[in-house]
Image (cartoon, rainbow, N blue to C red):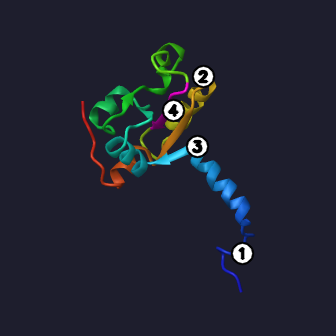
């Protein structure tokens, strides 16, 4: 007898490896970003793509505010072409990070999304900075 979990066909291990590996090429999580920012030398630029007012009210320490509508060639010129950008917005209910990731990719820039966004950061018990 099977359950609602096991009734749909289960992917074979090779397909699962390809799927989950591919997902990690597009996203990272709050804990990994926090660890990289506090315990390692970050090899990415963390972008908060919300409005400047929301950023000022609370943001991930070490992030730079660059609202999606401001992402463009001129603003990105200060970064080497191979700079990895990690984007986040308010949280799972917000598609701002996806919109920003699309703009960055259209400009030929490497990009990942910090899944969970600010909501995920707070849920992990990580502190906010204010400006």
Q: Which residue is mark 3?
A: 26
Report x, y in % for residue 51.
Answer: 39, 28
Let me know if residue 92 appears in the view: no
> Which mark lies nearer to you, 4 or 2?
4
The disc, 2 or 1, on the residue closer to the chain's N-terminal end is 1
- Separation (CA) of disc 4 from disc 2: 12 Å
Task: Report the residue that reaches farthest toward the top.
Answer: 74
Binning the other alpha carbons within 10 Å of mark 3 as few (below 14), some (14 to 19) or many (20 upward) gives some
Name the residue at 61% across, 49% down.
23
Q: Are marks 3 and 2 in contact (CB under 8 Å)?
A: no
Label number found at residue 7: 1
Report x, y in % for residue 67.
Answer: 44, 26
Q: Which residue is mark 2?
A: 107
Callout 3 secondary element: helix
Callout 4 secondary element: strand
- Separation (CA) of disc 4 from disc 3: 11 Å
Report x, y in % for residue 91.
Answer: 44, 45
Q: Which residue is mark 4?
A: 84
């Amino acid at each position: 007898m099977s359950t609602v979990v096991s009734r749909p066909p289960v992917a074979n291990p090779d397909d699962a490896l390809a799927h989950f590996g591919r997902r990690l090429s597009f996203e990272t999580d709050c804990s990994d970003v926090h660890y990289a920012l506090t315990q390692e030398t970050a090899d990415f630029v963390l972008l908060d793509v919300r409005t400047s007012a929301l950023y000022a009210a609370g943001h991930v320490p070490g992030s730079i505010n660059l609202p999606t509508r401001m992402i463009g060639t001129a603003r990105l010129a200060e970064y080497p072409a191979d700079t990895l950008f990690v984007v986040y917005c308010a949280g799972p209910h917000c598609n701002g990070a996806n919109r920003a990731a699309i703009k960055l990719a259209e400009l030929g820039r490497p990009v990942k999304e910090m899944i969970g966004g600010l909501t995920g950061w707070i849920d992990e018990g990580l502190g906010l900075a204010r400006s």
